[in-house]
Amino acid sequence: MLNIVWPIFIIISIIFSIFSGNIKNLNNSIFESVNNAVNLTITLLGTMCLWNGIMQIASKTSAMKKISNFLGPFMKFLFPKLKKEDKVYQEISMNMIANILGLGNAATPLRN
């Protein structure tokens, strides 16, 4: 649905800017938006790499194992058929820990 709505909005805005004589403003806003998007992407990429690296280091320490053990009853409730030795259990635990610590951006690509 959005792949239909957004192109329609873009086409309407281009047609409106041509008829109202504001094509220069439209052009400037396009380049300004692209610039902002690239800056945001670079900033988020750096932040994600930093926190993902910290979580990879933390996954090797005993602190994460202790926090995983603390999450054990909650994990058993959510995933009753999952065994504690499974790799998926560890990945879900690390993802939940990253979200608890407020590292939502680093929780998305988190892998052991």
Image: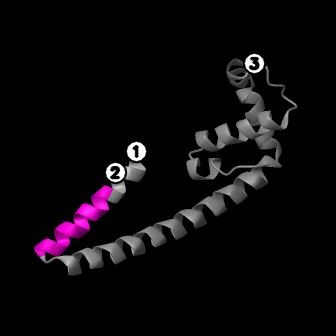
Residue that label 1 marks = 1
Residue at the location (72% across, 36% down)? 93
Residues under numbered marks 2 and 3 in contact, where contact means CB atoms less than 8 Å apart: no
Task: Point out the image quarter for the N terminus.
Answer: top left
Residue that label 2 marks = 5
Residue type at mark 3 is Pro
In this view, 65 is above or below 109? above
Q: Residue furthest left?
A: 20
Q: Residue furthest right?
A: 85
Q: Mark 3 or mark 2, which is nearer the start of the sequence? A: 2
In this view, 30 is above or below 94? below
Residue 101 disc label: none
Q: Mark 3 or mark 1, which is nearer the start of the sequence? A: 1
Residue that label 3 marks = 80
- Label 1 sits on a secondary structure element that is loop
Q: CA distance from mark 1 to mark 3?
A: 37 Å
Residues under numbered marks 2 and 1 in contact, where contact means CB atoms less than 8 Å apart: yes
In this view, 29 is above or below 11? below
In this view, 59 is above or below 50? above
Query: On the rendered structure, is 40 left or right of 104?
Result: left
Residue type at mark 1 is Met
Q: Position of residue 12 (x, y in %)?
A: 24, 62
Residue at the location (13% across, 72% down)? 19
Query: On the rendered structure, is 5 left or right of 13?
Result: right
Residue at the location (78% across, 29% down)? 69
Q: Residue furthest bottom?
A: 24
Looking at the picture, tell me which residue is in the foreground, 34 or 102: 34
Q: CA distance from mark 2 to mark 3?
A: 42 Å
